Image: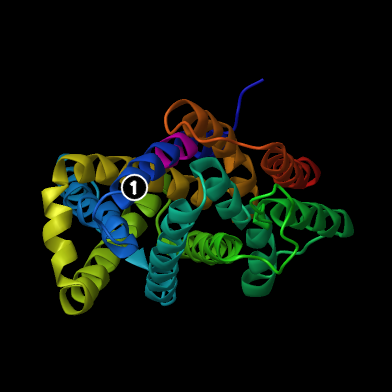
Amino acid sequence: MTLDFWIIATLCAAIFQTIRFTLQKILADGNLSPLGATYSRFIFAAPLIVLCGFLLLFSADISVPDVESQFLLFSVGGGITQILATVCVILVFKSRNFAVGITLKKTEVILTALVGTLLIGEGISTISLSLICLGGLGVFFLSKKVSAVGQPNLSSINKSAFYGLSSGLLFAISAVCYRSATLSVVSDIVYLRSGFTLLVVILVQSFVLTIWLAVFEPGQIKLVWQERKKGIWVGITSLGGSFFWFTAFTLQNAAYVKAVGQIELIFSLLISTLFFKDHINAREVLGMLLIGLSALGIILIV
């Protein structure tokens, strides 16, 4: 049995993304603000994608592709929501451990199906809705804090869950926007459609964050440069992950891609326990399992 290329691309994207979030957590634990850590992802990736673009144009018989009218709208919309989503993930990292932060982010799998229905008319069956509710139960287990005496705090969803769910929703919107953007590139070459979209998106993101930080957090640009030895690797892994995500979005429905991307949960759990020495309690394991089962069920029935 051979795997479809979109599945291979998604698995590669998940590996790159796990490494990138690991590096960003390290940066965020230092002197960088959430926006500063997010900025490192885009500003170090921008020169690399521009260089790759020039090499491709000059080394192959390929010209800049035409795009449909909605391309820029989807590219900018996806880029801005991805910036906000990444900030939310980093804020989760600051208050919860790495694996839980990634799991809360993975509500994007569930939310992508909903956003896809609202934005581009992709329907959801009754079984899918039931699986979405199962994932919501998993988020509930992850969102409850434990008091000093070990009893669950039954108050409303805490700040960590809010940031985690927000990141999931924003990543879901960006995923649907990116799929729509890649499909708006007029070309039969898959990697050209994904690569050109990625080039535009990263340049937009780098420009927006440079202006924002220069005005509101000017010291962060200097700190990002001081952390360039780590930041360059954030840029490389970000570029690799984004290219494979965009390629998968070009080939397949965004909800299916995000569902396969759940493999990231396993990678993040290994890194959380082996590298960061985080403690994963039974309640958090149950929450991660429920969200994982929810996403797996969705991909099996579609």
Q: Is residue 194 magenta?
A: no
Mark 1 closeness class: few <14, some 14–19, many ≥20 residues within 10 Å: many
- Of 190 and 115, nearer the camera is 115
Q: Residue at x 19, y 47 (%)?
A: 48
Residue that mark 1 sits on: 24
Left or right side of 88 for 158: right
Q: Residue at x 40, y 44 (%)?
A: 21
Q: Amino acid at mark 1?
A: Gln
Q: Please tell me whether the stretch drawn in magenta is mainly helix, strand or loop.
A: helix
- Of 194 and 108, nearer the camera is 108
- Of 75 and 107, nearer the camera is 107
Left or right side of 240 for 280: right
Residue 27 at x, y percent in the picture: 29, 48
Residue 86, quarter of picture: bottom left
Q: Which residues are magenta?
A: 13-17
Residue 146 at x, y percent in the picture: 67, 52
Q: Residue furthest front?
A: 149
In this view, 238 is above or below 157: above
Q: Is residue 120 visible?
A: yes
Q: How many labels, in total?
A: 1
Q: Residue at x 37, y 72 (%)?
A: 76
Q: Is residue 14 magenta?
A: yes
Residue 63 at x, y percent in the picture: 23, 54
